[in-house]
Image (tube, helix red, strand yellow):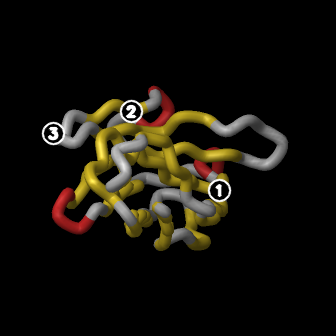
Amino acid sequence: QVQLVESGGGLVQAGESLRLSCAASGSIFRINDMGWARQAPGQQREFVARITSGGCATYADPVKGRFTISRDNAKNTVFLQMNSLKPEDTAVYYCNGEVTATTRATFVYWGQGTQVAVSS
């Protein structure tokens, strides 16, 4: 069994920063790609950023230059540094990870989400 738990969300003003964390735990053999997605009220969940186990990062256009994804492989943790936040960044942020368990089965797991609210 594998779990992903996010932390770090909150309410900030436009222009401020937040750092999200997501720790994976359980019967983990290896974690491949990890990433973040977000879902605003009334909208579909959308891709935000992804990082490979080797540290190669990809970003959605709306967050390029403002968000930075990173990971600590030793701690099975992924981070999302969010700078210059805008009201349109308001959403529930979900982390995800492609995890190979000790059974050698591979699935994409999701966290429960953390709320980010940006006021203007």
Q: Is residue 69 above or below residue 63?
A: below
Amino acid type assigned to the residue bearing label 1 in the image: Val
Q: Nearer the viewer, residue 94 or 85?
A: 94
Q: Which mark is residue 115?
A: none
Please tell me in which quadrant of the rendered image residue 42 appears. Answer: top right
- Residue at 34% of width from left, 45% of height from top? 104
Residue 86: x %, y % from top left: 56, 50
**Whether residue 46 is situated above or below residue 94 in the rendered picture:** above
The amino acid at mark 2 is Tyr
Mark 3, secondary structure of its residue? loop
Query: Circle 1 sits in a helix, a strand or a loop, which is it?
Result: strand
Whole-number angstrom distance, CA of label 1 to CA of label 2 = 17 Å
Disc 3 marks which amino acid? Gly
Tell me residue 24's x, y (percent): 39, 64
State the residue at coordinates (58%, 72%).
10
* Mark 3–mark 1 CB contact (< 8 Å): no
Q: Marks 3 and 1, Cα distance to the nearest angstrom?
A: 27 Å
Q: How far apart are the alpha carbons under marks 3 and 2?
A: 16 Å
Q: Which numbered tag is attached to residue 59?
A: 2
Q: Is residue 116 visible?
A: no
The quadrant of the image that shows the C terminus is bottom right
Q: Which residue is mark 1?
A: 92
Residue at image location 47% in from the left, 58% down from the top: 15
User: Which mark is first along the chain, 2 or 3?
Assistant: 3
Residue sticking out furthest to the top:
61
Q: Helix, strand, or loop for circle 2?
A: strand
Categorize mark 3 by other alpha carbons within 10 Å: few (<14), some (14-19), many (20+). few
Residue underneath mark 3: 54
